[in-house]
Image (cartoon, rainbow, N blue to C red):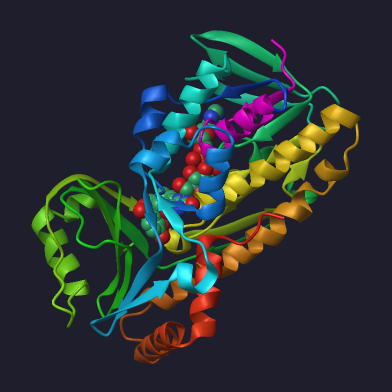
Amino acid sequence: MRTQVAIVGGGPAGLLLSHLLHLQGIDSVVLERRSREELEAEIRAGVLEQGTADLLNEIGVGERMMEEGARHRGINLQFGGRRHRIDFHALVGRGIMLYGQHEVVKDLIAARLAAGGKIIFEAEGVGVRDLKSEGPRVLFRKDGEEEELSCDFVAGCDGFHGVCRPCIPESACATYERRYPFGWFGILVKAPRSSEELIYCLNERGFALISTRSPEIQRMYFQCDPEDDVANWPDERIWEEMHARLANDEGWDLIEGEIIQKGIVQMRSFVIEPMQYGRLFLAGDAAHIVPPTGAKGMNLAVGDVRVLSRGLAEYYSSGRTDLLDAYTRTCLGRVWKAQRFSWWMTSMLHRFHQEDEFRYRLQLAELDYVTSSRAASASLAENYTGLPVE
Ligand code: FAD
Ligand code: DHB
């Protein structure tokens, strides 16, 4: 089997890259470890930056998003029992789109398959070879048969636990990492919306977040012990904790419903430099992870493949490698700014050590400043709605 670009991983990064390449006449094959059903059912991100939503529209995969997604013009920050709105539109003239990552994945898979694109689901034992040569190869098993895909380039879009990043020798890269002493407990709830826009809340008991997926399905998170087990959290305990954290003086109340999914997410910041090794280019979570508080992960993945697709298009149209050579530099400028923003939002909104009252007071003062200073609110709005890709 042969293709121009072999893409390992069929998450948002891999699928979008395949579609962007197709639009420029470049052939690719996506190798995905999981089944289509598993991919389309995984509940993860929900916030699309304006630029991400605009891109999906420009490339013809935004139709369902425009019908079913919700355009939000701001978010709320709650602390000390009071709610403060950050009005993105008034501050920076753009907003965000609430639309589930798995819906984006569904739309991209449908678009690829409709255009005759090749996605190999349930590809097992993927391994990449000869990355420093002009003819890299990807080995895998499909239905018990050993297969080999030869290509010009490999795109490592296989997420944080994928096989591509470990192929870069330690001597050829540097990694930067931070872990956080808490995780997020996420729930999916069958209930009407409690709030028109997201609520990020800091309370003495910890962080809580109210988000949404549709008028009928809501997404909520609360800070928990990263080693905790969902079995320790029967529904009644979850609601008790959510009500306690979201207690307020505004007469607002959380609407409960049937909890249809529970899960715990670890929190980590991570970057590998460079994002390239020979003919392997890493994109998305394979190259960097942010804690979810800034809602940046999927948006960064989209930014990376946008840059990569331009570099590959330049190479195939003119033989020039200027854009590919600049891939790491172009992406990392944005990645590190998103790292800073995600780390800052996380630090401001979580309880670190229950007994550290000094730190908690500083966090409350920071929230007070961010919500009362136009300059500080505008900085949050500018970062949250998305910095330019290049
Ligand atoms: P992934 O989505 O991880 O996709 C990688 C794919 O590669 C997977 O399908 C995997 O099965 C496949 N794969 C792995 N190994 C192999 C292999 N060996 N062979 C073949 N295939 C392989 N981001 C936002 O922007 N906004 C948010 O609101 C947001 N909220 C989040 C909330 C939660 C609870 C979580 C967990 C994440 C959130 N994120 C958010 C982050 C976002 O989900 C990720 O950044 C995004 O999924 C990255 O996309 P990706 O394609 O790079 O990687
Ligand atoms: C959602 C996820 C996030 O990480 C975030 O910061 C806001 C919303 C969500 O899943 O809806």
Q: Position of residue 267 (x, y in %)?
A: 44, 59
Looking at the image, residue 362 sits to the left or right of residue 280; the answer is left
Looking at the image, residue 227 sits to the left or right of residue 314; the answer is left
Residue 20 inside the magenta-drawn segment = yes
| Nearer to me, 138 or 256 | 256
Q: Is residue 54 above or below residue 224?
A: above
Can I make out residue 285 in this image? no
At x 23%, y 48%, the residue is 215
Q: Is residue 71 above or below residue 116?
A: below
Q: Residue furthest left?
A: 236
| Nearer to me, 81 or 263 | 81
Q: How many marks do you count on the picture? A: 0
Q: Position of residue 258 (x, y in %)?
A: 12, 47
At x 43%, y 63%, the residue is 293
| Nearer to me, 59 or 6 | 59
Q: Position of residue 208 (x, y in %)?
A: 29, 67
At x 85%, y 28%, the residue is 317
Which quadrant of the rendered structure holds the N terminus? top right
| Nearer to me, 19 or 184 | 19
Residue 325 inside the magenta-drawn segment = no
Can I make out residue 202 in this image? yes
Q: Which residues are magenta?
A: 1-23
Q: Position of residue 100 (x, y in %)?
A: 38, 43
Q: Quadrant of residue 42?
A: top left
At x 54%, y 32%, the residue is 60
Which quadrant of the rendered structure holds the C terminus? bottom right
